[in-house]
Image: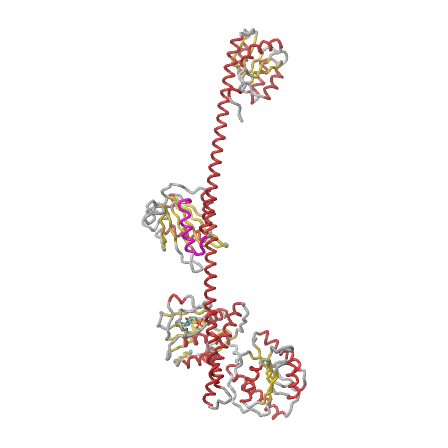
Amino acid sequence: MSTPLSQERAGILVVDDRPDKHVVYRAILEELGQDLVEATSGEQALKHVLHRDFAVILLDVNMPGLDGLDTAALIRGRKRSAHVPIIFVTADYGDEIRTARGYSLGAVDFMMSPIVPEVLRTKVKVFVDLYLLARQAKRQAEESAALAAERIARDAAERASRQSAFLADASAALSGSLIASATTRALARLAVPFLADVSALTLVEAEGVEPVTELAWTDPEAPSGIATEALQTTAWLGWRHAVERVITSGKLETFTPSHVLSITAGAGSGSPMVLPRGPQITALALVPLIARARTIGVLSLGMGPSERTFDSELLDVATDLAGRAAIALDNAFLYRTLHEQDRRKNEFLAMLSHELRNPLAPITNAAHMLQPNETDPRRITWAKEVISRQVRQLARLVDDLLDVSRITQGKIELKIESIEVSEVVNAAVETARPMLDSQEHALAVVLPAQPLRIKGDFTRLAQVLGNLLNNAAKYTDRNGRIELTVGHEESQIVFRVRDSGIGIPPDALGTIFELFAQVQQTLDRSRGGLGIGLTLVKRLVEMQGGTVAAHSEGYGCGSEFVVRLPEAIDAAPTKTSLTQSKPGGESVDASYRVLVVDDNVDAAESMAMILRLDGYVVQLAFDGEVALDAVRNLAPDAILLDIGLPRMDGFQVAERIRALPSCASTLLVAITGYGQPEDLERSRRAGFDRHIVKPIDPSLLTQMLAEHCRSRTTVNSTENVVPLRKRPAAN
Ligand code: ADP
């Protein structure tokens, strides 16, 4: 706290070597009511001026040692006392040289001794008053400087608290919705008028978000004082380019009025940046919205009617706001993606139940038909066909599902080799034939005259083309026309599957390859499907280095799917696949014995029935121990062994069978639900000759047994009996 002027006392330094003089000075100056400080030598006087300020110094000229003039010179030499008024007191007024030196040292006066009390008091008082006035002025200046600093600090604190409140409100508004468009609008409105007179939010086109610009500006005529508009395009090319630049760089950009004019190019020559119905913009700042290290949009802030500019403080707040908005928008996008996936998953589960349930009714009916008292061979044949057709359909569904999950987990390994195009086309047509025939479609396959070779995985490629043909058959009304053409373009082999079917609307073309995606179906879902076939097609084609695309002119205009794959440069022979081999029609040797081992009694018995119908002698075992006993007693020619047996699994049983000398040439077949390379390898190591993945195609099974039966007969007839011959591993 500073001392009021009336209470402040000035210092008066009296320097004289004679104590009696000090008594006189004290008597004269006491009534001024100031601090009288006494010194009896020049040295003492110097010490005092070092420690405090004085309003005036009375200095005796004639002193022993350091005289008055030398003392004055030293006083003047010190910064603190350089300007203190000095009154010299001398008895020798006639010494003009000393007087002149005194004035040159900055003396303000010379007084003759003996001094006149009133004169001295008056002169000293003048300096005391001056001193006190100067002190007061200085103190006032200091006080007003402190006041100004305090006001600035208070303003800054108020601004900071306003900004914090704004950002807190903004956070609340932005997190209020998980819908991106609502967040976008909220942000554009939040910025006005706190941060700018005009704001525009441009979102990057990603994750299914439309590139839209939400505009908001202060408008006294609008009910809330703020007008808004969503722009699809903008006339200001320069601005658009600047926004694109900020999206790429992720860095804030500001534009002064002259810059703003220069970026309005495109809206007419030199015209200023004027909003539709809104103000003219004079300053502009573009702030990137960054979430998870990606720029997801740009917040453009413009100044106009308020004539404000963008200082660093405002830009800091804008950057903070953009950061919060980016997180809110990112959350909204993530939420939407999750929501969409969830919706598709639920739809998929509903469809899956439907698709799995569909074949059950005909199977149940057909099973009912196969009662022991049913003797009509036509009805029995019909029932058998229904069951095998429906089981094939179920197996296809399950296979597709398993494939999707394996591909998603990266578990599918392709066997890339050089494939003859016509062979893979034949295999695909064979797969789709039942569907094509049931719909009575006409299929045209157009192959080039020269044989073409392709680099790919035979089975997977046949699956891809089979899927496309199946879809063509499914999405084309009865008696349609389907065409599969193969061509050679540059270094690619191009397959085109074209149909005269229901076609695909343009807006669905981009999504049909996504998992579970289906074009809006009729309520009865008469065409069925799970929406995974095309996902498999796309992934499998891409895994083989190719591409697939869909084309359609729309509803009712048919569709075309185009698969492009790299041509094989070498001419390595293709691997012959099992499906290509012809079914054998040989008669069965009545002494051929088959042991079926499966803990699922129904599965074991139904397989036994099929084999007995073909004329084989069949025995059943429902676990490993019983199977081993049966092997010892029956000495079967072939054993169909389920892997998933209780207690002793199929691999263990196989190893023990192979250890029996009597079983060296027995055909040992693994029956399992697993068909990965590692499963095949495990079967081979356990001693199996064949590995069949469930569900089993009965014709394949009987064909395999017939072949074995025939080879056994051939060996016996040409080489007589070759006991304990080690059977070569299958495949
Ligand atoms: P789905 O099991 O539904 O057939 P897909 O993944 O094979 O699943 O196909 C996805 C969707 O693409 C289908 O539901 C159908 O709407 C559409 N689609 C596929 N192929 C054709 C086609 N040839 N003609 C018309 N639409 C098709």
Q: Nearer the viewer, residue 216 or 647?
A: 647
Specify start and end residues of the magenta stretch as a single range: 176-195
Q: Position of residue 61 (x, y in %)?
A: 58, 11
Count of marks placed on residues: 0
| Residue 560 location (% of width, % of height) | 39, 72
Q: Compared with residue 681, is residue 514 higher up or lower down, i.e. above or below?
A: above
Q: How is the image coloured?
A: secondary structure
| 9 drawn magenta | no
Seen at 51% across and 14% down, the residue is 125
**Ligand 1 shows up in which quadrant of the image?**
bottom left
Q: Give the x, y percent position of residue 714.
A: 59, 91
**Nearest to the observer: residue 635 or residue 263:** 635
When the figure is inspected, residue 22 is found, relative to residue 566, above or below; the finding is above
Say which quarter of the image contains residue 621. Answer: bottom right
Residue at horizontal 35 percent and vertical 70 percent from the top: 555
Residue 628 vs residue 654, the one in the foreground: 628
In-front residue for pair 621/576: 621
Please check the rendered image and state whether residue 185 is part of the magenta-colored stretch, yes or no. yes
> Can you say whether 142 is above or below 627 in the image?
above
Question: Is 62 situated above or below 627?
Answer: above
Q: Quadrant of the C terminus?
A: bottom right
In the image: residue 380, left or right of residue 598:
left
Q: Is residue 30 visible?
A: yes
Q: Residue 76 at x, y = what percent? A: 56, 19
The reply to whether residue 261 is visible in this rendering is: no
The N terminus sits in image quarter: top right
